[in-house]
Amino acid sequence: MTLALAVAALALAGCGGGSSEDASSPASTSATEAKGAPKSASADPASPGSADGSEAQGKAGEGASGGQGGSTGSGADSPSGPGQKHGPHIVPPKGPAEQAPSPEEVAHATVANISLQSPAIIAANGSPGRLAATYTCDGGGSWPAMHWGGVPEGTAELILYAMNVQPVDGQLFVDWAVAGLSPRLEEIGAGKLPAGAIIGTNGFGKVGYSLCPAGSGEIYMFALYALPQSLALKRGFDAREVRKQILDVSGNVGLLPAVYERG
């Protein structure tokens, strides 16, 4: 779950040009979406995704290590070398090594440098935190309290999202979107929003918060985006479409994964 969640966090947060939201898997949802936003810190995820670990770090780290086919035949690690290791010989995978990201991709990658947390979602043993039924349609149906830190200087607006980690019908599914949050804010209460908050239309067609999985459960990703310029949105904005705009201008995000299982 941890690896899949990290890949999903990478996709949900947005990393690097393009804005396709019609992929069949989280990893292909937005391989290179975010462009041209100022960065205030080095790339770090949650993901969950981010989740959340460092999404940009993960991408850069994969490139730096050369992807497939690491070192297999030098010195002590060679079967004929002086420090021969015991055990079966493993043939390295064939194929081209994974290409390292270009300097431009690294410069424009979204970085999870905002700390997003919730007293209702506590991770344990390397797994994402569990979400109680009270924060879903099986309970009270209101969002949990959240607090954050590390919002970069120059931020004009914060926008908070809750999204399914897995796409629905091949598209990103947004469960909640709240724009118009002041960059001076550091928290929201459970089921409470500050003055000026602007609620978007989610994947259920509702203007509000709707975490309601179709099956036995779902993994969700909460994402707090810091925008260097305000989008001046109006109530009922299309959350999925607006997220594409967010990834065009935002280079900073906080990620918090949460697992809900019907019991």
Image (spheres, grey):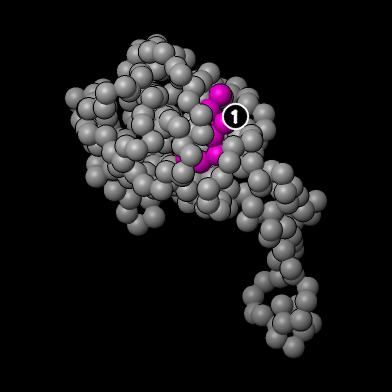
Q: Which of 79 and 200 is in front in this view?
A: 200
Picture quarter with the C terminus: top left
**Can I make out residue 145 in this image?**
yes
The image position of residue 245, as x and y in percent, is 56, 24
Residue located farthest toward the bottom when viewing the structure as drawn = 82
The image position of residue 93, as x and y in percent, is 74, 56
The image position of residue 187, as x and y in percent, is 28, 38
The residue shown at (31%, 22%) is 196
The residue shown at (35%, 18%) is 199
For residue 125, above or below residue 134: below
Q: In which quarter of the image is residue 21?
A: top right
The residue shown at (80%, 51%) is 96
Q: Which of 75 and 234 is in front in this view?
A: 234
Q: What stretch is highlighted in magenta?
A: 245-253
Q: In which quarter of the image is residue 197?
A: top left
Circle 1 residues within 10 Å: few <14, some 14–19, many ≥20:
many
Q: In which quarter of the image is residue 71?
A: bottom right
Lateral position of residue 154 relative to residue 122, left or right: right
Residue located farthest toward the front when viewing the structure as drawn = 154
User: Is residue 209 magenta-colored?
Assistant: no
**Can I make out residue 218 in this image?**
no
The secondary structure type at the circle numbered 1 is helix
- Circle 1 sits on which residue? 248
The residue shown at (56%, 45%) is 39
Amino acid tagged 1: Asp
The image position of residue 216, as x and y in percent, is 33, 29
For residue 258, above or below residue 70: above
